[in-house]
Amino acid sequence: METKKRKISIIGSTGSIGTQALEVIEKLQDKFEIIALAGGLNTELLKQQAQKFKPEYIYAARPVSVAGIKTAETLDEICSNKENDIILVAVSGKIGLKPTLTAIENGIDIALANKETLVMAGDIVMKKAKANGVKIIPVDSEHCAIHQCIKDISQVEKLIITASGGPFLHKSIDDIKNATPEQALAHPRWNMGKKITVDSATLMNKGLEIIEAHHLFGFDYDKIDVVVHPQSIVHSAIEYADGSVIAQLGLPSMHIPIQYAITYPERFEGIKSKSFSFAEIARLDFEKPDFEKFPCVKLAYEAGKTGGSATVCLNAANEEAVFAFLDGKIKLYNIYEITAEMMSRHKVVTNPSIDEIFAIDEDVRSQTREYINKLTTKVY
């Protein structure tokens, strides 16, 4: 008996997660029908994807057309199309928030690979998802791992999020302060976009994941721990009330969590199937994160516990600082200092609306850019 194909759209198909998702779908092409592919500025790659995968619709940030395929007017048009069984939100930045909310309001399940959606508006997003009976399946390897480990969430005592430690794990504070963008982008384990790779170098990425985990699983921040695990084999773990610890392991490949998210609750042989060997891995190391060397994690905990618009400020200030670092305007360590400064200036709004969240985001970004311009000239 032929199984019904799952209808899917990918928002961010030309990015790192989007391209890997299409590799997963190509391997499982009898399981999926692509409704829409939405890309950014890389219209050439989007055209190639459209010609290969034959979606019903395409959309890009600049004009694009492919013979025989409809062009969507907006992302909202794609995300309100109830033909979709699931939408993979794989864009980076605040652009992922509105399409996610649109899909939720239309009762469409989400495979979420966009941190900003929950960091900026986690309370609103999770409340809407619950009200509309929508599943949000995390794509981040850490949250995907936790999702796989949980059988009965009421019996879980603690979440344990692993961190690779990034390229500067065993470097001195001076080495970190003087790191170049090239050094920060040389991640030892994962192949990711530039912004998230720099966040991994400062460990801000882990801080953002703590905030995501709080919203996804409903745990207090005091019950979300971080442990550094350089091999990136244990992707995260949970501790039950009886002391049992359940962890999810796998090779450091985003194909695995992407496939889990878009095929959930089913599992199929995929790109990385049958390739895990304990004997070849040989050892697994763990250590406490050094909050003195990587203070961004502590900053994220503080923002999360404060709640409201504090996490909007954290996210916006950090992102603008990362862009300035990649542009050679500031040092790596300045990312923390700039974000902390913006956090100290911010007047927290307790329960911001979506419109207020976007207004606060714009205001913080503007202030951060202004602060950076006063601080410095190019350093690289």
Image (spheres, helix red, strand yellow):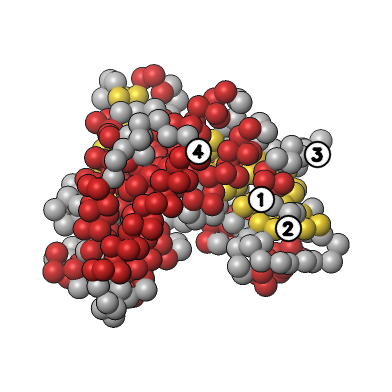
**Can you tell which of label 4 and label 2 is closer to the viewer?**
4
Q: Amino acid at mark 3?
A: Glu
If you read the primary sequence from the N terminus, does the residue marked by circle 3 or circle 4 appear first? 3
Helix, strand or loop at label 3? It is: loop
**Can you tell which of label 1 and label 2 is closer to the viewer?**
1
Locate residue 239 relative to residue 171 in the image: left or right: right
Q: Amino acid at mark 2?
A: Ile
If you read the primary sequence from the N terminus, does the residue marked by circle 1 or circle 3 appear first? 3
Look at 14% across and 53% down and name the residue there.
292
Whether residues under marks 1 and 3 lie with C-beta atoms below 8 angstroms apart, the answer is: no
Which residue is tagged 3? 2
Question: Could you tell me which quadrant the N terminus lies in?
Answer: top right
User: Badge 2: few (under 14), some or many (20 or more) residues near its Cα, within 10 Å?
Assistant: many
Q: What label does residue 75 carry, if any?
A: 1
Structural distance between the alpha carbons of marks 4 and 2: 27 Å
**Can you tell which of label 1 and label 3 is closer to the viewer?**
1
Structural distance between the alpha carbons of marks 2 and 3: 28 Å
Which residue is tagged 2? 58
Q: For residue 31, say whether it is visible.
A: no
Which residue is tagged 4? 354
Locate residue 78 relative to residue 312 in the image: left or right: right
